[in-house]
Amino acid sequence: MTTNKIILPGGAGLVGQNLVARLKAKGYSNIVVLDKHRANIDILKNVQPDIAVEFADLSERGDWQRHFENADVVVMLQAQIGGNDYQEFVRNNVISTQLILETIKHYKVPHLVHISSSVVQSMANDFYTKTKTEQERIVLESGVSCPVLRPTLMFGWFDRKHLGWLSRFMKKMPIFPIPGDGRYMRQPLYVGDFCNIIISCIENKVTNGIYNISGLEKVDYIDIIREIKKATRVRTVITKIPYFLFYTLLWIWGVFDKNPPFTTQQLAALIAKDEFEVIDWPGIFGITPTPFSSAIHETFCDAEYSQIKLDF
């Protein structure tokens, strides 16, 4: 069992919940998660009762900063992913990053792993893309040496958005709508593989480099939906509808839901013709990649974690 102290700002989200499970499986026990999503904090405390989990608004100075004393590594995970309030993206993606970097410098934490996003190279122009791009710039100009990991769309255990939400929508609705022809190429990344990359950075003390971590398989959106349907064995009928109608329905949803699971901005990002660089991350980080179909099966059929979903 290793005694290295690992701090996970934003660690109650998708990557954090999966990372904690995999760190513990490798013998790490001194883990501190700082997050402000109370429902997901409660889920993490219930699933992993033997680690330190604390409520913290990372966009404001506070008692949470004391945890960085004597820390060995910080994995910066906090991110505002969805929503319609731009200031929430600024607070959670930009201001929080400035404070965390300030705290790392104050306590002289020797190792940082920054989780950026592939969207910094995207043609999309939404709130998430703008603030994640600014976040990465701040990290790179901070003087704190660290590897910067840019994952593409991720899926896996605990998924509250993206594929997890799609699978739950399938179970509830007799018809599953697809915008347009559904032939929007994605490069989905299994979060289990991504967590193993983070652990490799920690264990091998990777201190620099920008790494575009894309899914190795190119899969169209409609084929992702079909694979989920196969794994979950639901009977919903997959139906293509015109893009404009799909957009209008999402817009109406957003009027009545302040935090919708899928927004018109995300729809625009879906159809953007992005193709992200594929590097040899299995070789660079010593990781054996999980085939897409196997990863989908693990995501939705795992006995221990697949039935646990995070809150929006």
Image (tube, rainbow, N blue to C red):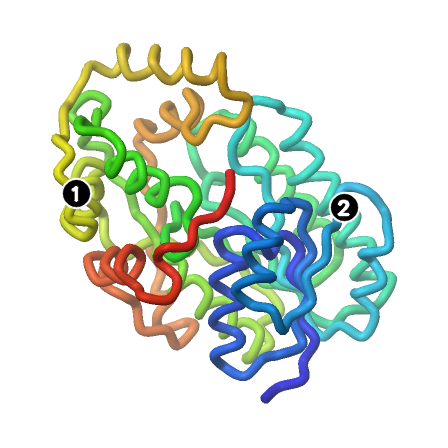
Residue 73, picture quadrant: bottom right
Q: Secondary structure at mark 1?
A: loop
Quadrant of the rendered image containing residue 109: bottom right
Above or below 237: residue 209: below
Please name the residue shown 54% across and 28% down the image. Answer: 83
Residue 198: give its label.
none
Q: In percent of the image, x 19 and y 57: which residue is there?
A: 293
Residue at 21% x, 43% y: name it.
Answer: 224
Mark earlier in primary sequence (2, 1):
2
Could you say which is closer to the camera, residue 225 or residue 310? 310
Query: Compared to 247, does 20 lie above or below?
Result: below
Judge from the rendering whether residue 228 lies leftward or rightward of residue 261; answer left or right.
left
Callout 1 environment at 10 Å: few (<14), some (14 to 19), or many (20+)? some
- Determine which residue is flagged by label 2: 98
Mark 2 Cα within 10 Å, few/some/many (few <14, many 20+)?
A: some
Tell me the tag on residue 234: 1
Element class at badge 2 = helix
Q: Residue 275's quadrant in the figure?
A: top left
Between 275 and 19, the one lying in front of the other is 19
Q: Position of residue 41 (x, y in %)?
A: 62, 53
Label 2 vs label 1, nearer the camera: 1
Query: Is 269 left, or right, of 48 in this rendering?
Result: left
Given the image, on which type of amino acid does mark 1 rest? Answer: Val
* Amino acid type, label 2: Gln
